[in-house]
Image: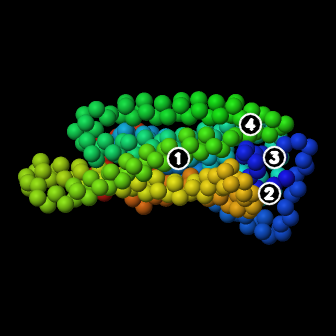
Amino acid sequence: MQDGLIDHVEYFCYYPGNVSCTKEVRTPSVSVLLYILAGVLVVVTFCGNLVVIISISHFNQLHTPTNLLILSLAVADFFVGVFIMPIIVIQSIETCWYFGEVFCFIYTFFLALLTTVSMINLAVIAIDRYIAICHPLTYSNKITAQIGAMAVAAIWISSVTYSGTMMLSGGNTEGVIGVDPCPDLIYSFLLPFFIMTTLYAKIFLIAKRHAKTISTQQRNSFGKNKNISKKSERKAAKTLGIVVTVFILCWLPFYVCSLLNQFMNLAVPSAVAWACLWIAYVNSGINPIIYALFYPWFRKSFKLLITCKICSPESSLIKYLNGMYIYL
């Protein structure tokens, strides 16, 4: 039996046949430290994405097409923190699967689903930013919150369909849930990766061109408002570009491991495989930190949450303007 990822199938729970689990020996202090670190990551992922979900859902001003896509991404990350991370914490530290075959199927399905949702979300966000920056008139006239909601629904429906198909085609052989990494790599990573990198390259080239022409535009109030709008769109594109870059950096090692095993028959050591998987999961807790650093609305929403001002009857009508809270 090879160590780590084996043959042409990734075994997410346990090995096929009558192969007993050989538990790795760790000192109690190491196990406790690993549980503490993993627990911190789970709490950060849970709380950070919950703030994003509550903020965008509650405040009317935040109901924009882009924010609805961010909300969808936060929901996927939230469920990773609630459902996927606790299970993988136990499996990676104890090095054995204790939850049975049925739960393995459920766990693997949601793992594939949430990863696919995140990938498609980020690809659609790239499309959204591309239209906003490169075709601003089309964006303002045709891309509404309703369109954003329809896009989110399409993302989740297509992800459920794709993940279910992958699970059924992978089958359940000898108590092992397997997913062939080759098509999963293409549709869940390479295709969205190509879309995101291509569109963001075009976005930043056009944004750079816009920045050079702003100083030559007319100085009347309409021109100023237009420049402010363009600057806001570019800032949003920059922030979401960081989100996309971090996502790719976090998931790339995992898919590299899959490629090494699939096409080069290289056995990836267990410790390396687990490290790559955990780097991928860390991404779910990083996004809220990025929002906190670059989005004023996130920081203000967090302040309203911890001060319980969100519980007031008209809190959903609060509008952020120049650092102050006013009602719409």
- What is the tally of numbered marks visible in this picture? 4
Residue type for callout 3: Tyr
Q: Where is residue 176? Give x, y as percent.
A: 80, 40
Left or right of 131 on screen, residue 294: right
Q: Where is residue 293? Give x, y as percent.
A: 42, 61
Does dot 2 land on a helix, a strand or a loop? loop
Residue visible at 79% across and 57% down in the picture: 3
Left or right of 135 on screen, residue 18: right
Q: Where is residue 151? Give x, y as percent.
A: 43, 33
- In which quadrant of the rendered view does residue 44 lie? bottom right
Marks 1 and 3: CB-CB under 8 Å? Answer: no
Marks 3, 2: nearer the viewer: 2
Q: How was the colour assigned to the protein in this rendering?
A: rainbow
Give the alpha-carbon distance from disc 4 to disc 2, as whole Å: 22 Å
Give the alpha-carbon distance from disc 1 to disc 3, as whole Å: 27 Å
Q: Which residue is labeled 2 in the image?
A: 3
Q: Where is residue 172? Give x, y as percent.
A: 78, 34
Q: On the rendered image, what quadrant is the C terminus found in?
A: top left
N-terminal label among 4 and 1: 4
Q: Which residue is labeled 3 in the image?
A: 14
Residue type for callout 4: Phe
Does dot 4 land on a helix, a strand or a loop? helix
Q: Which residue is labeled 1 in the image?
A: 190
Q: Which residue is labeled 4 in the image?
A: 105
State whether residue 97 is above or below residue 214: above
